[in-house]
Image (cartoon, helix red, strand yellow):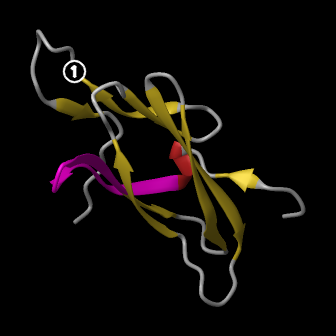
Amino acid sequence: MNHIEFAECADVAFHNIDEVQVAENHLLHVKGLIFHSSIVADHVDLYPEQHAVHILVSMALTRPGKSGLFDLYIPIPDRITTVTFGTEKKTLWKREAEEESTSSTPVAAQNFG
């Protein structure tokens, strides 16, 4: 890997995509594992946009002290309606419209535990 590559939804087994409340903060808990045996999650960047938060997980070759696991708590204030993942910007979570429900939907939820 001579250049930076980013994980896409197809590279990751998502263990959790759940909303949590911590004190006054409404958060989205995203936990996943890159399932390539020689690849680790090197760095995670969050890019807020107008009504979305975009997650990019850079991948690197395996090295001591690193793993393919990432565990994020992302603030999701009322103005955030979508959380996307990877360069393809696949939707992981989308807030349901107020008139439909007050809850949200994890779109790419895979629960393995």
- On screen, residue 63 versus residue 70, left or right, reads right
Q: Which residue occupies the foreground of this view, 13 or 63?
A: 63
Span highlighted in magenta in the image: 12-30
Query: Which secondary structure type mostly characterizes the magenta part of the structure?
Result: strand
Q: Residues within 10 Å of mark 1 (few under 14, many from 20)?
A: some
Q: Residue at x 32, y 28 (%)?
A: 94
When the figure is inspected, residue 88 is found, relative to residue 60, above or below; the finding is: above
Against 23, residue 90 (above or below) is above
Quadrant containing the N terminus is: bottom right
Q: Is residue 7 left or right of residue 29?
A: right
Outermost residue on the bottom side: it is: 64
Name the residue at the top extreme: 99
Say what amino acid the circle numbered 1 marks: Glu
Q: Is residue 27 magenta?
A: yes
On the image, numbered disc 1 is attached to which residue? 96
Give percent across and percent down for residue 75. Answer: 35, 45
Side of 56 where 13 appears, left or right: left
